[in-house]
Image: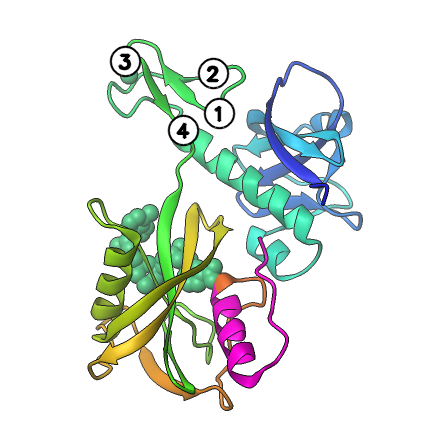
Amino acid sequence: MIERWTTAVLDTELPGGWAVARGPDGFLHDDNGALFPRHWLKGQDLPLLAEHGIGHLDGEPVYLLELSGRAEVPGCGWKSLRAFMLEGDHTLYKVLGYAAQIGTWAREHRFCGSCGRATVQVPGERAMYCEPCDLRAYPRISPSMIVLVTRGDEVLLARSPRFVSGVYSTLAGFAEPGESAEDCLIREVREEVSIEVRNIQYMGSQCWPFPHSMMLGFHAEYAGGEIVPQEDEIEDAQWFNVHALPPLPASRSIARYLIDLYVARRLGHAEPVLPG
Ligand SMILES: NC(=O)C1=CN([C@@H]2O[C@H](COP(=O)(O)OP(=O)(O)OC[C@H]3O[C@@H](n4cnc5c(N)ncnc54)[C@H](O)[C@@H]3O)[C@@H](O)[C@H]2O)C=CC1
Ligand SMILES: [Mg+2]
Ligand SMILES: [Zn+2]
């Protein structure tokens, strides 16, 4: 399969291509989507913080205009990355998800974390550089484990107080220094619901640019314990029968994929495909 979208570090001195603009309210869009002719977009008097050449879409260069504040463009509106994830073209969402991660990282690494001096972008490399310290800051990626724990026909799902009302999802958490993926998974499940697991199986991964998680998805079997939801983090956790599931997470999430896959295997239905 030919990839429509590939990332690259492009020279911002070169003319042409497409551009996306990101401000405090998300990405600029109109009826045609979020990609605009770059020359036109740069003529819109936007409060530009930085420009990044981010890759190629269908062979055409794509740039990000990262803005320092709010702006209005006639005939256009602003839409959050999450809204692009939930609806619309998946390739466009991939472009915008990457753009968001690059924009956030570059914005947050304008100064050296060691000496406090201004950093510069390294030409041809995705790095912010402090010359006196010889220190490069690369885009930040935070590994997070996500796991569906099952017990026969039952799946363990939980709600965080941050979730949309009624929705239950798989357990997830960030890796800490010193942990393997499995260590992290076991700790997170213990912390969040006080359950022990066994037969941990890796199922697949997904980039989750909110703001920079890398989700590593697992399946695990229940091995013991009673559910005790973690105070403040977990509002409720329950075993749900595969025939009586609550409202579930968005269909493009790996959480949903892990649930749908288990249910499909249990019921002998066609297996879902993990959205990249
Ligand atoms: N794609 C998907 O299907 C899903 C993705 N997620 C994502 O998984 C990630 C982890 O899930 P949570 O339950 O929120 O994590 P968690 O269970 O580790 O708890 C969040 C806490 O971790 C700490 N934290 C925040 N950012 C961190 C980082 N970069 N590294 C280490 N610790 C950090 C903070 O103390 C925060 O309160 C989040 O980004 C969440 O959006 C969660 C569920 C579904
Ligand atoms: Mg968690
Ligand atoms: Zn420095």
Residue 137 position within the rendered picture, expressed as x and y whole percent measured from the top left: 37, 26
Based on the picture, tell me whether residue 269 belongs to the magenta stretch: yes
Distance from disc 2 to disc 1, alpha carbons, whole Å, reads: 7 Å
Q: Amino acid at mark 3?
A: Cys
Q: Which residue is mark 4?
A: 138
Check disc 1 and report the residue beneath it: 126
Residue 265: image location, x then y, percent: 53, 78
- Distance from disc 1 to disc 4, alpha carbons, whole Å, reads 6 Å
Q: Earlier in the sequence, mark 2 or mark 4?
A: 2
Disc on res. 122: 2
For the residues bearing labels 1 and 3, Cβ distance under 8 angstroms: no
Image x and y of residue 227, in percent: 24, 82
User: How far is the residue under mark 1 from the one under mark 3?
Assistant: 18 Å
Q: Does the residue at mark 1 contact the one at mark 4 (Cβ under 8 Å)?
A: yes
Mark 3 closeness class: few <14, some 14–19, many ≥20 residues within 10 Å: few
Whether ligand 3 has any atom under 8 Å from the Cβ at mark 1 is answered as no
Q: Secondary structure at mark 1?
A: loop
Which stretch appears magenta? 255-276
| Ligand 1 under 8 Å from disc 4 Cβ | no
Q: Which secondary structure, mark 3?
A: loop
The disc label shown at residue 158, or none = none
Asked if residue 12 lies left or right of residue 259, the reply is right
Q: Is residue 70 visible?
A: no
Which residue is at the front of the view, 4 or 209?
Answer: 4
Q: CA distance from mark 4 to mark 3?
A: 15 Å
Q: Secondary structure at mark 2?
A: loop
Which residue sits at x=78%, y=46%?
Answer: 75
What residue sits 48% from the left and 84% below the top?
246
